[in-house]
Image (cartoon, rainbow, N blue to C red):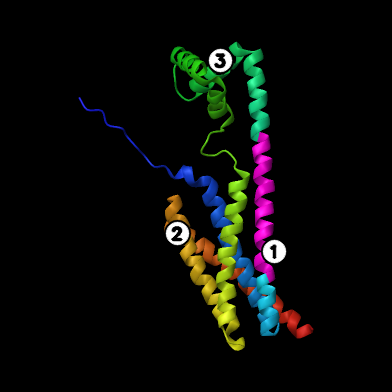
Amino acid sequence: MSRHTHRETHRTLRIGWLRAAVLGANDGVVSTASLLVGVAAADASHSSLLLAGVAALVAGAMSMAAGEYVSVSSQSDTEKADLARERAELLAQPEHEHRELAGIYVERGLDPELANEVARQLMAHDDLGAHARDELGINEMTSANPVQAAFTSALTFSAGAALPLLAALASPATLVVPMVAGTALIVLTALGVISARAGGAPVFKATLRVVFWGALAMVITASIGKLVGAVV
C-alpha cells in the first residue's frame, strides 16, 4: 500500500504579510495621489508639486514602517505576556489546565471522555502549544512579526506612492490632475484584483471597495485644494 501525503495551501498563511502589503500599497497610492491632486488643484507650480510628492513618499513610508512596527510589537508583547502567564499556570496547576483544555474540546463537540484523552495526549506532547493554540488563539500563522510588517508596509507604500508621483512628473502642468487621478484609479483597480485573488476574496467587491475610497479621497482633497487655492 502506498502512502500519499496530502498537502494543502491555505491562504491564512498569508495573513501577516498580505494585510501589511495591501495597507501599505493602498495608502501609498491614495495618500500621495490625493496630495498631488489637492496641491495641483490649488494652482501650485510644477516644481512645488513634485517636491510635495517626494516628501509625501519618504515621510509616508517612514510613518507606515514606524506605525506598523509599534502596532505589531504591541500585539507581540501581549502574546508573549499571555504565553508567560499560561506557562506559569501549567507549572502551578497542571490538573486545572487539563480540565480547562478538555472543556474547550467538549464545547467544540467532543464527548467528555474523548475530550479528556485528547487534552492529555496534546499536553503530553506540547502543553504550552496546545493551550496557546486552543485557549489563547495564538499559532504560527497568525503570530505577530513586527519587523516583517514594518518592512512590508514601507516597501509597498513606496511602490504605491511612486506611481502617481511618476505620473505627475511625466504630465504637463495642465494635465496633472487627470493624469494622476487616472493612474491612481488604474493602480487601485489592479491592487484590488491582486489582493482579492491572493486572499481568496470576491474580486469585484474587493476591487470596488478599494477604488471607491481612493476616488472619494481624491475628490475631497481636490475640492479642498481648489477652495484653499481660491482663498489664498
Quarter of the picture holding the N terminus: top left
Give the dominant element type of the magenta stretch: helix, strand or loop.
helix
Residue 63 is inside the magenta segment = yes
Residue 229, percent across and down? Answer: 74, 83
Q: Name the N-terminal-most of marks 1 and 2.
A: 1
Tell me if 133 is positioned left or right of 2 in this view. Answer: right
Comparing marks 1 and 3, which lies closer to the viewer?
Answer: 1
Mark drawn on residue 10: none
Q: Count residues near mark 2 (Cα–Cα under 10 Å), then give few for <14, some for 14-19, many for 20+.
A: some
Q: Count residues near mark 3 (Cα–Cα under 10 Å), then give few for <14, some for 14-19, many for 20+.
A: many
- Secondary structure beneath disc 3? helix
Q: Which residue is mark 2?
A: 194
- Secondary structure beneath disc 2? helix
Q: Which residue is mark 1?
A: 59
Q: Are marks 1 and 2 in contact (CB under 8 Å)?
A: no
Corner quadrant of residue 75: top right
Q: Which residue is mark 3?
A: 98
Q: Name the N-terminal-most of marks 1 and 3.
A: 1
Q: Amino acid at mark 3?
A: His
Q: Amino acid at mark 2?
A: Ile
Q: Is residue 55 above or below residue 198?
A: below
Corner quadrant of residue 95: top right
Span of residues in magenta = 55-78
Residue 213 visible to the viewer: no
Residue 230, percent across and down? Answer: 75, 85
